[in-house]
Image (spheres, rainbow, N blue to C red):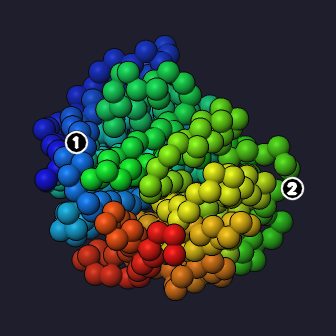
C-alpha cells in the first residue's frame, strides 16, 4: 500500500563542494526511496507514525512494532542520528549517517520517510544559529534524506518545508519547521531546581525561534486552506513544566504562533515533537479558544531514566521508555486520534478528538 523502497544497504561517498577542508570532501549517498503519495487520494484514513532520538550505533527493535502499525508515512522529527561534531571533525557526522543508513536498510521498511533535524543531527547539543558547521550539516542532511535537487530547501538556508496530502477530497497539510538554523541563543538558568534545570524563559522580545524568513513562510502556509493541519517542531511547543529546550524559552515566539492560529481560524492543530527522551500528550487553547494538541515521542532507542516533571497542559503521565507516536485521521468522521506506543506497540496513552468539537 506504500511506495517507500529501500533499494540498498550500502552507502557510498560522493564529493562535497562545501569547502577545502579534507573533512568536507565526501557526502554520504542517501538511501534511494520514492516519495509518491498519489495512492492516498482514494483513502479516507491517514495513518502517520513518527519518532525521534535514534542512536545509529544501537539496535532499533521498535521498528518491528512500527511496521505492524502500517503507517502511510513515517516522520523522523529530530535527533535521527547522533552526529555531534567535535574539534571541527566533520568525519564523525559522515560516519553517523553511514551507520544510520545501514540501520534503516536492515529494518525492511516499506513506507515513505520524511525528516527534520534536531540538535544532534544539526551537529551540536542545544545548537542554534551560531553553530559554525550548520551549512555543512545542512548539506549532509539534504543529501542523506535525498531531498530532490529542485526542492526549495536547496535554494535557501534552513530545512523547513511543507507537504499536502489529498485523501478522498480532504486536504492534510504537514508543516515541517526548522527550530535550529535560525534560533537565537537561549537564556541559561540561574538555578538547577526542577523546572529550571538548564534554561529559563527570556525576556528578550527580539529572540527568535524561526528567524524572519521562516516566520514569513510559516504565515503563508497557515493562510493556505487545509482540512487538517499537522505542525512538526523538533522541540516541544505546549509543554512548560521543565527547564530544558522548548518554545516556552521564547514566550514572545510561542505567543506569536498562538496568535496566528486565531488570526487564520485554525482549529485542532496537531503538533508533533521529540527531543525530550520522554513521550507525552498535551492539549491547550489559544486566547481565542481554539484547541491545539501535541504529541511528543522520544526516544526510539535512546532511553534516559528521568523523574516525572510538572505537567501543565499535559494529558496523563510522561513515559521514558522507548516509544513511537501515531496520528490517525478519519476524514469521514473528522476523528483525530493521537496514540503513544511502547517498543512492542502496546498503547501507553491516547487522546481522541473530533474536529471542531
State the count of labels.
2
Q: Secondary structure at mark 1?
A: helix
Res. 203 mark: 2
* Horizontal side, residue 83 vs residue 250: left or right: left
Where in the figure is residue 225, as x and y percent of width and height?
50, 46
Of helix, strand and loop, which one carries label 2? loop
Q: CA distance from mark 2 to mark 1?
A: 46 Å
Residue visible at 74% across and 71% down? 196
Could you say where residue 269 lies in the image, as x and y percent from the top left?
Answer: 53, 61
Corner quadrant of residue 127: top right
In the image, residue 159 above or below residue 279: above
Q: Nearer the viewer, mark 2 or mark 1?
A: 1
Figure quadrant of residue 59: bottom left
Residue at image location 58% in from the left, 79% down from the top: 314
Residue 223 left/right relative to 253: left
Circle 1 residue: 38
Give the residue drawn at x 68%, y 58%. 262
Quick check: 316 left or right of 25? Answer: right
Position of residue 103 measured from the top left corner of the image (x, y, whole percent): 24, 51
Please tell me which residue lies in front, 165 or 52. 165
Position above or below: 20 against 259: above
Amino acid at each position: 500500500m506504500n511506495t517507500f523502497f529501500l533499494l540498498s544497504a550500502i552507502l557510498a561517498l560522493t564529493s562535497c563542494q562545501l569547502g577545502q577542508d579534507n573533512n568536507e570532501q565526501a557526502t554520504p549517498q542517501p538511501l534511494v526511496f520514492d516519495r509518491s503519495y498519489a495512492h492516498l487520494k482514494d483513502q479516507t484514513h491517514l495513518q502517520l507514525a513518527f519518532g525521534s532520538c535514534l542512536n545509529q550505533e544501537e539496535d532499533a527493535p521498535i521498528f518491528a512494532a512500527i511496521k505492524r502499525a502500517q503507517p502511510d508515512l513515517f516522520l523522523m522529527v529530530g535527533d535521527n542520528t547522533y552526529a555531534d561534531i567535535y574539534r571541527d571533525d566533520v568525519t564523525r557526522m559522515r560516519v553517523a549517517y553511514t551507520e544510520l543508513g545501514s540501520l534503516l536498510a536492515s529494518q525492511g521498511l516499506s513506507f515513505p520517510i520524511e525528516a527534520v533535524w534536531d540538535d544532534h543531527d544539526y551537529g551540536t547539543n542545544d545548537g542554534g544559529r551560531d553553530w559554525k558547521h550548520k551549512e555543512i550539516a545542512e548539506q549532509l542532511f539534504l543529501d542523506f534524506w535525498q531531498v530532490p535537487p529542485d526542492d526549495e530547501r536547496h535554494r535557501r538556508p534552513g530545512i523547513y518545508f511543507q507537504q499536502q496530502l489529498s485523501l478522498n477530497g480532504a486536504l492534510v497539510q504537514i508543516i515541517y519547521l526548522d527550530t535550529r538554523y535560525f534560533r537565537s541563543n537561549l537564556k541559561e538558568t540561574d538555578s538547577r531546581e526542577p523546572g529550571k534545570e538548564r534554561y529559563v524563559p527570556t525576556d528578550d522580545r527580539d529572540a527568535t525561534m524561526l528567524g524572519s524568513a521562516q516566520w514569513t513562510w510559516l504565515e503563508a502556509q497557515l493562510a493556505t486552506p487545509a482540512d487538517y493541519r499537522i505542525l512538526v517542531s523538533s522541540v516541544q511547543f505546549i509543554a512548560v513544566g521543565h527547564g530544558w529546550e522548548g518554545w516556552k524559552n521564547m514566550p514572545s515566539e510561542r505567543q506569536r504562533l498562538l496568535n496566528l492560529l486565531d488570526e487564520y481560524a485554525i482549529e485542532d492543530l496537531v503538533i508533533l515533537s521529540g527531543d525530550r527522551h520522554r513521550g507525552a500528550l498535551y492539549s491547550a487553547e489559544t486566547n481565542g479558544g481554539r484547541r491545539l494538541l501535541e504529541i511528543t515521542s522520544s526516544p526510539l532507542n535512546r532511553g534516559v531514566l528521568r523523574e516525572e516533571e510538572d505537567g501543565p497542559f499535559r494529558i496523563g503521565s510522561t513515559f521514558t521508555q522507548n516509544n513511537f507516536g501515531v496520528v490517525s485521521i478519519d476524514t469521514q468522521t473528522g476523528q483525530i486520534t493521537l496514540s503513544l506506543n511502547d517498543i512492542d506497540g502496546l498503547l501507553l496513552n491516547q487522546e481522541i478528538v473530533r474536529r471542531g468539537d
